[in-house]
Image (cartoon, rainbow, N blue to C red):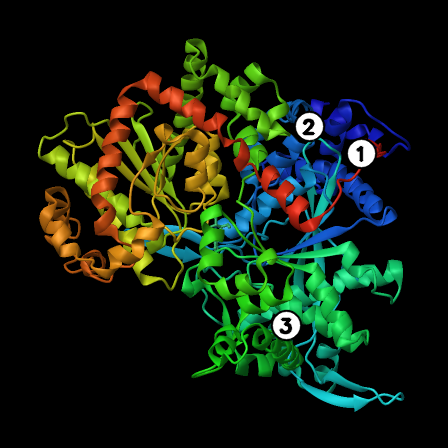
Amino acid sequence: MTKQDEQVCVVKGWQAGPVIDESTLSDDLTRHFYYTLGRDVVGESQLYLYHALALTIRDRLVARCRETNQQIKQQKRRKTAYLSLEFLMGRALGNAVLNLDLESQVTKALQAYCTELESVEQAEHDAGLGNGGLGRLAACFLDSCASLALPVVGYGIRYEYGMFNQSIKEGNQVEQPDNWLREGHPWELSAPEQAKRVKFSGYVQSYTDKFGREHRQWISSQDVLAVPYDVPIPGYKNNIVNTLRLWKSEATDEFNLTEFNAGSYSEAVAQKNLAEQITMVLYPNDSSENGKELRLRQQYFLSSASIQDVLTQWIEQYGNDFTEFAQHHVFQLNDTHPSIAVAELMRILVDDHELDWDQAWNITTKTMAYTNHTLLPEALEKWSVSLFAKLLPRILEIIYEINARFLAEVAMHWPGDVQKQRDLSLIEEGGEPQIRMAFLAIVGSYSVNGVAALHTQLLTAGLFKDFYALWPDKFNNKTNGVTPRRWLAYCNPSLSQIISEKIGKDWIGDFAQIGQLRRYYDDPQFHIKWHQAKQQNKQRFVDLVKQRCGVEFDINMLFDVQVKRIHEYKRQLLNILHVIHLYDRIRRGDTQGMVPRCVLLGGKAAPGYMMAKKIIKLINNVAEVINKDPQVSAFLRVAFLPNYNVTAMETICPATDLSEQVSTAGKEASGTGNMKFMMNGALTIGTLDGANIEIRDAVGAENFFLFGAQAEQIDDIKAHYNPSEIIANNPDLNSVMHLLESGHFNLFEPGLFDDVINGIKSNNDPWLTAHDFASYIAAQRDVDKAYADQTYWTQMSILNTAASGSFSSDRTISQYCDDIWHLTPLDTTHQTVKTNTD
Ligand code: Z57
């Protein structure tokens, strides 16, 4: 008998009562591998071994999840429902092993299969149910809520296809569908018995009940079924396991029946498709809206199913009395995407439960809270009234009623000011009437927050200033954060190890403690270890770049990285102009003081965003010219990483020396990549935008490379902006523009970059690329000077990690909890789970 065969015979896992010994996890793994999955050979890909391990760990999660839910229910806990169209979770395995503290057991168990966790986890697909910052923020928040033992449930959509896979063909982005569920998703558990019905279309009718009361009724609707799939969210070593509930759309039974019985087979199948389309695919737009009907269906589908879910649980426990409802529930709206929830809660309370309007409105405005993530006009959602009339007729009526009552309040506050009423109306008139979703969210919520200090300030002084005048107490700031579990402890084991050697391991659960690292910023022995850890991480990164881009990076060069969605306001273009400038200097022989660099850019462009795709092409063309020039390679190498995602960032941020955060001031609401890099000891080159400002304040101006116009200067600069003059007066920029205009990077594709070039030269360039060029180049020179002194650089690196304490999402969530949610942590000491799977 082989060793593996022996283990099959041991079925200790099924004995009753608590069984806790080290071999149990091994036994469970083997049981799942041989029986649940029916396998006996570990294949090349280790896919089945991954599934068996995931199921083994899921057993442990499920047991704790049940207890967490029981505690919430028995203790009648106040809780938050976090509503989001996006949860960018990435992989779950490594994170669960860390949070459940199973590393040594898993390592042991995998030895029997002659492999290790780092290898097995490669078989897991990213759960890419989000675009970028907003979706990843939701994922970090779930980790922090569970780790802080807060009763918070995430509600989202179980997209069959997540964020598209990006490949690069001849320098251009090509999108491929992300069929992430194909090989199964072992973490989820479906609960079809808790499915909800969601109404679409039909029409609204009045009727009078036997007491003579008028009611409105949404009838002849085409209903869709929302089936929940629950994903467990483990807290960090606290036995808490929260839930992310993802809804899948399905056709209702009668959909199929009536049509089938009428003999219309094809119509029945077509209807089924319509229902199942709703959760088919994630819309790949980050920070821009495209107003497609299917997207509105997704938004209502999520909002309605989630509100119904919470109300169903309420009624089960408290019956039909809603007087205490607002004391027990909060709905946090992640941007305006789920803001229809405001109207949906009103509809259910008024139509289905026959509450007075005022009672219902009181409940709604005491439970809804809204987070704004952008000031960009193109990202502010508006939906045409006619689309609402067709798709959600009753919801439209409710929005009209909310608006009428709100405008009466506006009239009281600004008597006789008709323009004010027009400006603040939930309905934008003039042309096709549109519903302003941000206004609906503000009016319906008791809290409105921005995501960084500058962003919140700009919101209250600009876009939302009238609302701020009306309700100053509603507005508050919650600067974003990222989870130090995934973004340091898990993704950077070498650095984590040496940190823990100095300050102990408690920083992982209590990240304010990372500040203690400051004591060692000058310690030469610690410097050596810090540098060694960085070099190890750089080697992993080199391997990734070699494998994915075919470009040879060198761990002894400075690693300069910008990875994020491609958007003009984020100014990947400014970065590539700097790269061209370095190339130009090298060709002129002006390498005095130049530090050898490897520059990596990565990110996806929305498929319809032509300029963003052009920028990707430019980066790739520039990289190709530079990388094949042997004269240049000692100083400069450039790569574009295809398919940047959560998992790629786990290798990238630990290896980065220089973090590029170069958005036009006032445009990046917060940024969160900036925080991941900082935690991992990268230095930032950045503008005074979003959370960069707070990062610089925390680490000190001397440890941050600042450049560029400030937000309050932007309007003045734009008023007399003349990039041609700037170019003419700046030999460096002039030279770069010459290279671009001469077709140096598009020899066989003349005119290819004309739009990009014209954008830089336009007096109306909203991104002020030419304006910030000179100060950016100067800041990059400072980077070289600093990097040339490795001791100095290492000091600054340590100080960055040490100062990153407040950029933990634990801090952010504590503030949501104190100022908005008012939840009390669950009991973590009285967990009694000792199941046979422990
Ligand atoms: C998105 O990822 C963000 C804002 C949006 O309006 C949409 Br739609 C998607 C981002 C911001 O651009 C980042 O600055 C911010 O850090 C992130 O949301 C999380 O708040």
Query: In the shown orientation, is residue 427 left or right of residue 31?
Result: left
Res 401 quadrant in image: bottom right
Q: Which residue is mark 1?
A: 837
Q: Secondary structure at mark 1?
A: loop
Spatial separation of the CA atoms under disc 3 and disc 1? 38 Å
Which residue is depicted at the point 49% across and 49% down?
133
- Would you say residue 642 is visible in this rendering? yes
Residue 765 percent location from the top left of the image = 25, 59
Q: Which mark is residue 275?
A: 3
Nearest to viewer (mark 2 / mark 1): 2
Amino acid of disc 3: Ala
For residue 492, above or below residue 343: above
Q: Is residue 191 left or right of residue 210?
A: left
Q: Earlier in the sequence, mark 3 or mark 1?
A: 3
Mark 2 secondary-structure assignment: loop
Circle number at residue 258: none
Callout 3: SS? helix
Q: Is mark 2 within 8 Å of ligand 1?
A: no
120 vs 460, left or right, is right
Is the residue under label 1 in contact with that under label 2 (CB below 8 Å)? no
Residue at image location 49% in from the left, 62% down from the top: 465
Q: Which sits earlier in the primary sequence, circle 3 or circle 2?
A: 2
Which residue is labeled 2 in the image?
102
The alpha-carbon separation of the residues under discs 2 and 1 comes to 13 Å
Q: Residue furthest front?
A: 415
Q: CA distance from mark 3 to mark 2?
A: 41 Å
Residue 281, image x, y percentages:
54, 62
From what the image shows, is residue 95 above or below residue 257?
above
The answer to which of 262 and 525 lies nearer the viewer is 525
Residue at left offset 44%, top offset 24%: 799
- Which residue is more in the foreground, 471 or 8? 471
